[in-house]
Image (cartoon, grey):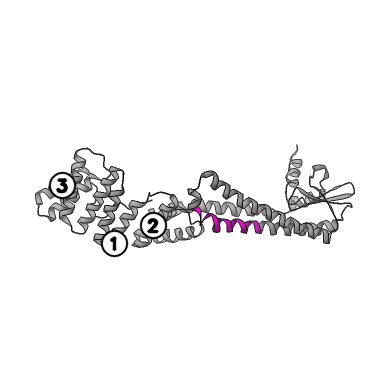
Amino acid sequence: MGINDYRKKIFLNSQYCTYYNINNYTILAGIMRNNGYLYSVKLPDEKIKQINKAYRKFTTLLNSIVAVEIILYIYLVIFPFFIQFMKMPFWAAILILALIPLVVLYLTYIGINCIYENYLSRYVGTFKRTPFKPEIKYIDEKAFKEYESTPRKSVYIVLILAILFLGYIITPFVISGLNNSQKYAQAESLAGIYLKLVPIAPEVYAQKAYAEFNLKQYKEAVADYENANKYSLSDGFSEDIIGVKTYYLPYKEMIAEFDKAIAAEPDKPVKYLLRSEKAAYQLKNKDYKVAYDELNKLVNAYVKDEQVFFSPADVYFNRGAARAALGDANGSKLDKAIAQKMCPDCKFNFETKLVRKP
């Protein structure tokens, strides 16, 4: 097959191929491409031009309706009921997500095709239904030449879709980069725009929450971390939520939050991490005796070589701070020296380590 025949094959399958002539009769294409309409005469060029204009208008109408249907389906069905779909058996979710749009799209094609048939019967004349099966030998050369010289709208559509797809893929990385550069206001703003368009992206909710945390918008950060958990169908950001809450909840209420989280945590090393963070929070709020007792237990767990997720250097330093507050200057000096030896470059403080950079 030569290059010219290859181009003609493409032409046959495109919406620019709207008719072909066999002997002294013309077969027109339907909106549904397998449908054809046979006229017992060869239609004149002027009539064909008129039909082509109408055909393009009907296909534009069809494509516009289909685009609107897809957008409405995404924003009225998929996004609002995303969690319910994810909790369904896989086969049931696929069946619903595929069957509904396919039926709607098929009905749309039938509806537009019926309207087009009505147009043909009124403005062109009576036809006989027949399959539309054009072959290279039936191509009208003038129609093919016009096709070759016509700008391809599909190129622009593909370009727009490519830009949208790249935006969907790249924007979360841009938000992450803004957070890494400590441009938190820009990160929060861009994440907000993205989530209006794609409101089921857990990683973007986490990035937005991290930016809000650094902007001291603590309640907003908690809400976005909760959304990150919700749409990831996990509790992966629960520790971040606890960390953010330490900045605005009343002391007793926050201690209750810690106790609840520690009791619910099945993983012992993570339980130790939560206990170390609770002790740091108690130190920050000058509850020295209670914090010291807990830090002693954590140091003993580390010394016994138990698996722990907390930083031993932080725990030693915090115990040193508690000892200093309780009047044990020598013990405080020893603990802080151990901490500095473990981590010479560390800048120790009582701020939470639970809020992680996504």
Q: Answer left or right for 215 relative to 284.
A: right
Residue depicted at 35% across the width and 59% down the height: 213
Reply yes or no: does residue 71 show up in magenta.
yes
Kindly identify which numbered label has been placed on residue 249.
Answer: 1
Kindly identify which numbered label has been placed on residue 209.
Answer: 2
Amino acid at pointer 2: Ala
Q: Earlier in the sequence, mark 1 or mark 2?
A: 2
Question: In the structure shown, which secondary structural element does the residue marked by tag 3 occupy?
Answer: helix
Q: How many marks?
A: 3
Report if residue 155 is visible in the image: no
Asked where in the image residue 49 lies, by quadrant, the reply is: bottom right
Q: Earlier in the sequence, mark 3 or mark 1?
A: 1
Amino acid at pointer 3: Asp
Residue depicted at 55% across the width and 51% down the height: 165
x, y percentage for residue 50? 81, 59
Q: Nearer the viewer, mark 3 or mark 1?
A: 1
Magenta residues span 65-82
Q: 170 or 260, which is in the foreground?
A: 260
- Separation (CA) of disc 2 from disc 3: 35 Å
- Separation (CA) of disc 3 from disc 1: 30 Å
Q: Nearer the viewer, mark 1 or mark 2?
A: 1
Cβ atoms at labels 3 and 1 below 8 Å apart: no
Residue depicted at 21% across the width and 41% down the height: 302
x, y percentage for residue 38? 84, 51
- Separation (CA) of disc 1 from disc 2: 17 Å
Cβ atoms at labels 2 and 3 below 8 Å apart: no
Question: In the structure shown, which secondary structural element does the residue marked by tag 2 occupy?
Answer: helix
Residue identified by numbered label 3? 335
Asked where in the image residue 3 lies, by quadrant, the reply is: top right
